[in-house]
């Protein structure tokens, strides 16, 4: 079985990243990115785009880290930021972890 390697090209096709704010936003997808399931690729694509396109990607884990799910695998947002952008702006705001309530 071939191991999938997460590339900048793949990330750029799936997510927009703002290095100033640290926010990832889902991009619109095309039908060729979907499998036929109970519905057609076109139906699955339209449903996904209506629900996610333009929305902030990810959710916070119980330990406070922002996690984004890609191809059935979870990635921490700060790890994706390192791959998505070769250099982060010095004014980058780290939202990849919620502040502790201590």
Image (spheres, rainbow, N blue to C red):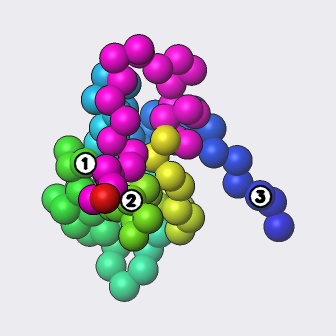
Q: Are marks 2 and 3 in contact (CB under 8 Å)?
A: no
Q: Main secondary structure of the magenta part?
A: loop
Res 83 quadrant in image: top right
Q: x, y percentage for residue 79?
A: 55, 42
Tell me the quarter of the image containing the C terminus: bottom left
Residue, disc 3: 3
| Residue for badge 1 | 56
Kindly check if marks 1 and 3 are in contact, taking CB atoms under 8 A apart as contact: no
Q: CA distance from mark 1 to mark 3?
A: 27 Å
State the SS at label 3.
Answer: loop
Mark sitting earlier along the chain (2/1): 1
**Which mark is in front, 2 or 1?**
2
Kindly state the secondary structure of the residue where label 1 is placed: loop
Residue 87 belongs to magenta span? yes
Magenta range is 79-101
- Element on which disc 2 rests: loop
Residue at the location (46% across, 20% down)?
88
Identify residue for label 2.
64
Q: Residue furthest front?
A: 102
Mark 1 or 3: the one toward you? 1
């Amino acid at each position: 079985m071939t191991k999938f390697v997460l590339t900048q090209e793949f990330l750029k096709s799936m997510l927009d990243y703002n290095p100033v704010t640290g926010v990832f936003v889902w991009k619109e997808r095309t039908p060729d990115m979907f499998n036929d399931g109970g519905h057609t690729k076109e139906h699955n694509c339209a449903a996904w785009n209506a629900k996610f396109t333009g929305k902030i990607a990810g959710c916070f884990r119980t330990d406070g880290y922002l996690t984004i799910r890609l191809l059935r695998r979870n990635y921490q947002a700060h790890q994706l930021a390192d791959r998505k952008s070769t250099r982060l702006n010095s004014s980058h705001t780290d939202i990849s972890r919620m502040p502790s309530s201590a």
